[in-house]
Every structure is written in structure tokens, then in C-alpha cells.
Amino acid sequence: MRNDAYKSLKYGTTTEKYLNMKLNFTMKRLIFQFRSETNYVFYKKASNLKGNRKNGFGNCELCGKETEDVYHVFCQCIHYKKHRNTLVNESGLNFHQMERIDFMVSTFTRLDENKVKQICKFWDNAMRTRDFICTY
Ligand SMILES: [Zn+2]
């Protein structure tokens, strides 16, 4: 099922555009992780989201409403709304309430360098918020 979605997003056998951009490795790795829908995301540090087998596909600790995965962070959770609004204002990328995960993943295939940087900033800020709320 997931492979079918990937095939619909992947055209031909060329290298993905973001891999040839002048970005550091950690940024490219982050986009790769989002495109591959992993929920163990490593950017500046590990973010072990609850939505994986090891964590029992658990719900978000911030809102408790949905499984905590990358889609939830980018598109659903109310606690990241401020960062999502900043992302819209600075890059035009609007993930808020994006209805389907394949819409989100396809967005990651159509990025320029500036948008990749804005997404990395969003993730960094969102994970700082997550760490702060989960710690206190
Ligand atoms: Zn949430």
C-alpha cells in the first residue's frame, strides 16, 4: 500500500531535487525521513514520536487526540499551530489541516532550498515545543 503511494509520487529514476541542493546533510536527511514516513526522526537530536510499533502507535502527549506521527505534527496538532503559521507566512507552505498524508508527502517532493530551510526550522521549533511541554 505504502509503496503504491510512493510510486504515484516518484516519477522516473532521477535523483530527488533536494539531494543536489546546497544544504547540509542533516537537512537532507530530515527531508528523507519525512518522505519515508518514519516516526523516529533525527534532526539535531532524536525525536522518538509515539506513532511507531515500539511505542505502541501511541497518541500525541500534547493533545492526546491522534497518533503522534510526522503527519500529526505537520498537519493536525493544535500545539504546533504557531509554528505552522510561521511556516505559512515565511514559505507559503500550508500544512494546516492538510487532509491526507500523501498530500503532505508530495509537498516534500516539490521544495526549493529556501522551503527546505523553513521546514527544518519548523521541525526544530516544533520539537522544542514538544520537549518543553513534555518535560514540564
Ligand atoms: Zn497533538
Image (cartoon, grey):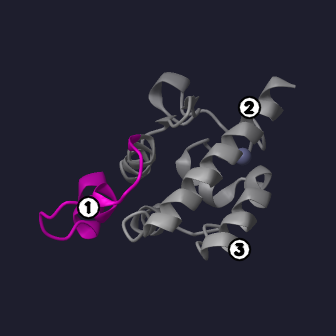
Q: Which sits earlier in the primary sequence, circle 3 or circle 2?
A: 3
Q: Are marks 1 and 2 in contact (CB under 8 Å)?
A: no
48 relative position to 29: left or right: right
- The amino acid beneath tag 3 is Asn
Q: Secondary structure at mark 2?
A: helix
Location of mark 1 (residue): 16
Q: Which residues are magenta?
A: 1-25
Front: mark 3 or 2: 3
Which residue is drawn at the image coordinates 61% and 56% (left, top)?
A: 74
Q: Say which mark, if any, is on residue 25.
A: none
Q: Amino acid at mark 1?
A: Glu
One can see residue 1 in this view: no
Label 1: how many residues lie within 10 Å, few (<14), some (14-19) or many (20+)?
A: few
How much space separates mark 3 and mark 2, taking CA atoms? Answer: 24 Å
Is ligand 1 within 8 Å of the beta carbon of the residue shown at mark 3?
Answer: no
Disc 3 target residue: 89
Q: Out of 55 and 89, give the one closest to the viewer.
A: 89
Q: Nearer the viewer, mark 1 or mark 2?
A: 1
Q: Which residue is mark 2?
A: 131
Identified at 56% across, 29% down, the residue is 45
Local SS, label 3: helix
Q: Residue at x 23, y 66 (%)?
A: 10
Other residues around mark 3 within 10 Å, as few (<14) / some (14–19) / many (≥20): few
* Near-viewer residue (50 or 22): 22
Residue 94: give x, y in percent of width and height. Answer: 62, 72
- Mark sitting earlier along the chain (3/1): 1
Q: Is residue 10 left or right of residue 115?
A: left
Q: Is residue 18 shown in magenta?
A: yes
The C terminus lies in which quarter of the figure?
A: top right
